Image (cartoon, rainbow, N blue to C red):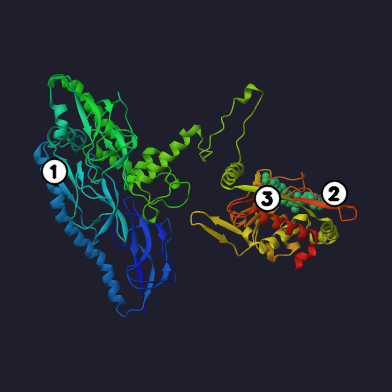
Amino acid sequence: MSEQEIKVPDLGGADEVEIIEITVSEGDTVEEEDSILTVESDKASVDLPSPASGKITKISVKVGDTLKEGDVVGMIETDDADDEDNADDEDEKPARDEDEDQEEDKDEDQDKEEKPKKSAEKSGGGSRKETVKVPSMDGAEDVPVIEINVQAGDEVAEEDPLVTVESDKATFEIPSPYAGKVEKVLVKEGDKLSEGDDLLEMTIVGGGDDEAGEETKEEPKKETESKSEPKKEAPKKKSGGGTRKETVKVPNMDGAEDVPVLEINVKDGDEVAEEDPLVTVESDKATFEIPSPFAGKVTKVLVKEGDKLSEGDDLLELTITEDGGEEEAETDTETETEETTEESSKDKDGERESKPKSEEKGKSEESEPVPRTGGGKVHAGPAVRKLAREYGVDMGRIKGSGPKDRILKDDIQAYVKGELQKTQEGGVSAASGAGIPGVKLPDFSQFGEVERESMSRIQVATANNMQRNWLNVPHVTQHDDADITDMDAFRKDLKAEGEKRGVKMTPLAFVLKACAHALAELPQFNVSLDMERKELVRKKYIHIGIAVDTPNGLMVPVIRDVDKKGLWELAAEAAELAGKARDKKLKPNEMQGGCFSITSLGGIGGTAFTPIVSTPEVAILGLSKASMKPVWDGKAFQPRLMMPLSLSYDHRAVNGADAARFTTLLSDLLGDVRRLLL
Ligand code: CAO
């Protein structure tokens, strides 16, 4: 037996990473290479593997800590006699791997990075095609592509992410080894990649100048236009002036055919810049835009939403204005080209206008992280985070559809689209959030003096919860009266004892006890519905919430295990929790876990009301003020103290007959409290 430190291995170039998940606990037994924790840099999420098989004896880090290579995250006890050696080996492994990697990287650098740079330096402005290959992935093979970050026609800077892949150890992006234009993406989502596989084809533009930044921004465009894109040459190169018509055709869509048009982004008469999106199509794998290959004026859109497109289909007709000669073109074309370049630069990079790409990249990576509301860690690559920043999207609100809930570009688009739809459909306010028409407020001051005050946090939460519950739950309310004459007499008998105990016995304690009995006898009321999984969640415990009216709004503390507590205990606990609620001293866990709720307006008045079920509970009991009523006993009317019961229930979980059984049972129990002992 020996103990060894668990250290952070080579982080693939990342200086510091943040722990987003700790996957083991002290005492756990793990196999060598099992994940110990997951860290995330701005480039990738990586699982840190156990260096050996054994028992975790110590975890010395927590979620949120930042780590660098060599940091100790815990200890592992191994029972292998060769552990020491192994440990040394393990410790050395990353270093050796790193060296090897560096060697490989050097080779690769020479093959992949220096070559283009050199040729760019030498070429003085020429362009050449390169097939970008999958680099070394630390030995990982057959790694599935989970996201393609670029499409044909995209201009990318060196190091821009091209695709995101996920091995069983890590999710990471394959960066572009060059700055240039993506000509053809050779892989699709789901493809399995290994080192050396062809990824995409790029046109790399040479510079010749020392101003690398300028090169990236302007040269590529001009060179690309004049040399490597014959399609675009015609309209740009002709110098006679005038206009000509072009029919824009559907480009290659990575082999996809019969792809439906989701949205037409332009209409007849629109001026479009090169690369502006013309239509959005959606295959079963991805939603993407078909960009305009030319700048010009849309003369006729030839497709409509729902049409199915394949490569080569006619999309629309464009009128392209050709420049009138080289000299004059200087002013016009220059401006236009710049505008176009800046436009597309804006499209892709959001706020920045004319800075070189390399500079923009640095800036974007340093930008403030997107604020989150959910508290949980967001898993997403830098490209997706950048997109979210551009849209101003709070990623904490989005549920990722990728592996380990990773947020993908599609998720951002779907979220933004959903939010837009909500606001567009009948002017729904974001706050209503339910797809129902919002309420337009009149100018109240026209009717008299008004003043506005902010709603408290509790009021806002209550409003949202009530609306959510009301809209989600098909409500029915069952009414009944309970004869509490004898119960009230007993309650009054307890008054002196209550004073001694310092506890006030109100009808609520009896109702709590009676409800616990009824929930045990009719367990269909002690469930929650899981509609996603089409399951009933049956609870084996009986925790009951009581609605408390406070100056700050409605609060619902929960009394746990009501079935196991006596009347004095329940009366005392209800009073204590109600006091805490009014003094704003309730802890979050004192308001959680309820199976059923009681809302008592008995101390105030009223004869009946319709409480709103607090979903995921399926029922709530409302109590109104008890009053003396003449009750026929078969021979004569007797004065009896009757307490109105209003049981609202979720008709998806509970049927009407059961609701009537529940209130009848409650009436019986409250009518003869001795039965609570049975
Ligand atoms: N019929 C007649 N009298 C009743 C009664 C009933 N159903 N329920 C309570 N009373 C009496 C009590 O016995 C007490 O009288 P005494 O002082 O003479 O003994 C008086 O009314 C006041 O009771 P209480 O309100 O202090 O105590 P409680 O246990 O009945 O209720 C609590 C506690 C926290 C539920 C209550 O204070 C409260 O906040 N109720 C409002 C809940 C609410 O807002 N619900 C609406 C939610 S949906 O909008």
- The answer as to whether callout 2 falls within 8 Å of ligand 1 is no
Q: In the figure, 51 relative to 47: above or below?
A: below
Query: Residue 247 at x, y = what percent?
Result: 21, 30
Which residue is denoted by mark 2 in the rendering?
629
Quadrant containing the N terminus is bottom left
- Residue depicted at x 62% and y 47%: 475
Query: Residue 619 at x, y = what percent?
Result: 64, 53
Q: Nearer the viewer, residue 40 or 660?
A: 660
* Mark before the other along the chain sequence, 1 or 2: 1
- The answer as to whether callout 3 falls within 8 Å of ligand 1 is yes
Query: Residue 560 at x, y = what percent?
Result: 65, 61
Which residue is denoted by mark 1 in the rendering?
129
- State the CA–CA distance, disc 2 to disc 3: 27 Å
- State the CA–CA distance, disc 1 to disc 2: 93 Å
Q: In the figure, 10 relative to 550: above or below?
A: below
- Residue depicted at x 47% and y 50%: 375
Report the amino acid beneath label 1: Lys
Which mark identifies residue 544? none
Q: Nearer the viewer, residue 312 or 448?
A: 312
Query: Residue 105 at x, y = what percent?
Result: 18, 56
Report the amino acid beneath label 3: Ala
Residue 459 placement: quadrant: top right
Helix, strand or loop for disc 1: strand
Quadrant containing the C terminus is bottom right
Around disc 1, counting alpha carbons within 10 Å, would you say few (fewer than 14), some (14 to 19), or many (20 or more)? some
Helix, strand or loop for disc 2: strand
Q: Single out the residue that lies furthest toward the right.
A: 636
Which residue is denoted by mark 3 in the rendering?
547
